[in-house]
Amino acid sequence: FYAALLMSEQKEIDVLVTGLPVSQYMDVERREALKSRLEGEHQITPKRSVAVKSVVVVPQPAGAYMDVVSSTKDEDLLEIIQGGKTVVIDPGFFSVDWVALEEGEVRYHSSGTSLKAMSVLLQETDRLIQEDHGGAPGIEKIEKAIRAGKAEIFLYGEKVSIKDYFKKASTKVAQNALIPMRKSMREDGMDADVVLLAGGGAEAYQDAAKELFPKSRIVLPNESVASNARGFWFCG
């Protein structure tokens, strides 16, 4: 947070927008506590302070919604999003958040959080490799390779294709993570015209989203890892 204020090169911030995981956002006290903590003057370095005048807290995946609404050049998509039912799925490292919106209004009963996220997916990838090769590269090594866009890693001096193992793991983990979401939506009578995938793990959940929402339009924004942050900018 302080690093972001420092990089802004401003003495005053009129509006600061941040997000909380959906389950935490629904806790009003937690939301207000975060807002109070971020507002006011912050001493960044001994000789540098930044004043934050106002703070807006939103459900994390709502940023991706605002990103697409504010930047898409696809008029048909925009019309569907603004007039229909949209689900934003945001897979993070420790949790998967989802927000359901109808004509731009959040449907809280159909929104929520699952703890079966990227960390679980990496653990399953590691387990599958160990099952086949008799040894595991470790979660950290797999994560670094994926972030670097590498398709292979070395294990016992041999190249191992992590792409296939990661895909196999994502099929199982992503579906399990999204089942509670589908259940809550059915209970709320909510379906989806559009499913937006956001966050660094968006691509890993694409196949699962297609399977759970076969009739919905699946949208994966460019540079999805930054889609929430871009949306926060538009919210401000």
Image (tube, grey):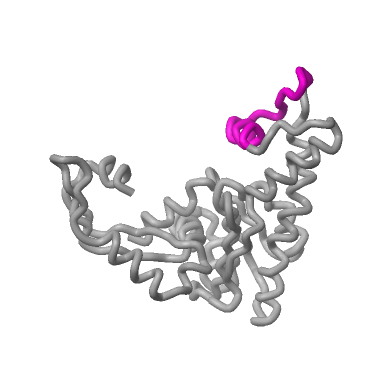
Residue drawn 66% across and 28% down?
150
Is residue 194 rendered to the left or right of residue 223?
Answer: right
In this orientation, which residue lies closer to the viewer: 155 or 99? 155
Question: In the image shown, does 105 or 24 lie closer to the viewer?
Answer: 24
**229, above or below 180, in the image:** above
In the displayed image of the protein, which residue is found farthest to the right?
A: 132
Asked whether, in this view, residue 146 is left or right of residue 27, the answer is right
Instruction: Pinpoint residue 203: horizontal percent, then vertical percent.
Output: 65, 47
The spot of residue 108 in percent (x, y) is: 54, 76
The residue at the far left in this view is 47
Residue 88 located within the stretch drawn in magenta? no
Q: Is residue 3 left or right of residue 81?
A: left
Q: Residue at x 70, y 78 (%)?
A: 186
Q: Is residue 231 visible?
A: yes
Quarter of the picture containing the C terminus is bottom left
The correct choice, above or below, for 110 with respect to 94 in the image is below
Q: Is residue 154 magenta?
A: yes
| Segment colored magenta | 140-158
Q: In percent of the image, x 51 and y 70: which residue is there?
A: 82
Residue 192 location, x and y as percent?
Answer: 65, 70
Q: How many marks?
A: 0
* Image location of residue 189, percent across then percent down: 67, 82
**What residue is at 74 percent from the left and 65 percent from the top?**
215
| Frontmost residue, 50 versus 119 | 119
User: Seen from this angle, which residue lies furthest front?
Assistant: 135
- Dividing the picture into quarters, in which one does residue 56 lie? bottom left
Q: Is residue 65 visible?
A: no
